[in-house]
Amino acid sequence: MTTLVSARSIEHGDAVALEWDDGAVTRFHAVWLRDNALDEQTRSPANGQRLITLNDIAPSTTIDRVRAAPASLTVRFAPEGRSVSFPVRWLRENAYDRDHERSPGWAAPDVETWDAALDAARVTGDYSAIARQPAALAAWLGHVRRYGFAKLTGGPVRSGALIEVAERFGYVRETNYGRWFEVRTEVNPTNLAYTGAGLQPHTDNPYRDPVPTLQILYCLENSAAGGDSAVVDGFRAARRLRDEDPAGFDLLSHHCARFEYRGAGDVRLSARRPMIELAPDGELVAVRFNNRSTAPITDVPFADMKAYYAAYRRLGEIVEDPAMAVTFHLAPGESFIVDNTRVLHGRTGYAASGGTRWFQGCYADKDGLLSTLSVLRARNLAADAA
Ligand code: FE2
């Protein structure tokens, strides 16, 4: 482990510079350290929540004393006179004095983009295993985090079983479509998903804000000819557009599209969001792509609209490129989950006569999934350490 060699006050006490045994120098501001102090008057020992506001910290806060030990840094804040220690591991983990330059379309290191070469078997879990074995559940949820997509096999062929899948890690998001919805051919469908038509890969419900961040599609019958499922990594598609046409990528990420759904009399949903959403520092946040529910786009200047449409068309071509899609035919009791802010799903058309196709779908949210994953991983680490 890296150890702290020395620490000194710099910029008249506005910051400290730490020197590490690997030669690195890391600076921290006095106000940042005071705000993040780990003592019991600043952070609740019971729940870790901060007990003070920034307004409780004097704007003139500086550091007037610094003491470095191999495993900790102790600083004293003036004018308060409070001394606080920080473990060096914590300081290394939370260091911000580094190169922040990143190219638009970057993603966290544990996000891995993919195309048709992804082997779906690698991201498949077993229904009974994830129900009984925390390690199997953690591995399956980890696929969703890394790839935005995972399959599940060996589940019961029972209406509503998809809810049990969602409840393994979190909570169902109930919408106007219900706690779950039936995906099979209807006579007067309220949504084109409920027909035998093929569906271009899309994200669901972009007309909703916040958008449901997870979707589970669970197969109960699938003997119709066709009706294969397809998933496409929207992050990979967005990066491909960026690499081919950076100006087009900028247009789709800097201007909002509009999405709308008025399929049933008592529902009028609308949202204004970009097709490619980036954080202010260029991180890929979300992709929204759905030809059925894109409303008239009115937030793109006239001078840019033609180029915007060219980029929108190109993104659609990329999304439909077979080289991008992982396709599979689900059997009854099998399901898949997608990160609906990233991975598009679609299906090939199927004949309404001759065989049946019955899926159920539901929404859930990533916060619950990532929380469960984080808890399972922490327990696993603790068990390994014990
Ligand atoms: Fe869908």
Image (cartoon, rainbow, N blue to C red):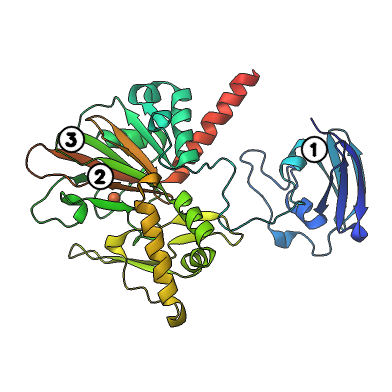
The answer to whether residue 325 is visible is: yes
The amino acid at mark 3 is Asn
* Residue 333 to residue 170: above or below: above
Q: Which residue is rendered at x = 15% and y = 34% of the image?
A: 223
Q: Nearer the viewer, residue 132 or 195?
A: 195
The answer to whether residue 215 is visible is: no
Tell me if 263 is positioned left or right of 254 in this view.
Answer: left
Judging by the rendered image, the residue that carries numbered circle 3 is 222
Judging by the rendered image, the residue that carries numbered circle 2 is 180
Callout 3 touching callout 1 (CB < 8 Å):
no
Which one is in front in this view, the residue at disc 3 or the one at disc 1?
3
Q: Position of residue 127 (x, y in %)?
A: 34, 26
Q: Is mark 3 within 8 Å of ligand 1?
A: no
The secondary element bearing badge 2 is classed as loop
Gap in Å between the C-alphas at discs 1 and 2?
A: 48 Å
In terms of sequence position, does the residue under pointer 3 or pointer 1 come before the other? Answer: 1
Tell me if 27 is positioned left or right of 99 in this view.
Answer: right
In terms of sequence position, does the residue under pointer 1 or pointer 2 come before the other? Answer: 1
Callout 2 touching callout 3 (CB < 8 Å):
no
Quadrant location, the C terminus: top right
Q: Position of residue 264 (x, y in %)?
A: 18, 62
The secondary element bearing badge 1 is classed as helix
Q: Is mark 2 within 8 Å of ligand 1?
A: no
Gap in Å between the C-alphas at discs 3 and 1?
A: 56 Å
The secondary element bearing badge 3 is classed as strand
Q: Position of residue 115 (x, y in %)?
A: 43, 43
Q: Nearer the viewer, residue 343 or 47?
A: 343
The amino acid at mark 2 is Trp
Label placed on residue 88: 1
Give the crowd class for mark 3: few <14, some 14-19, many >=20 residues within 10 Å. Answer: some
Gap in Å between the C-alphas at discs 2 and 3?
A: 18 Å
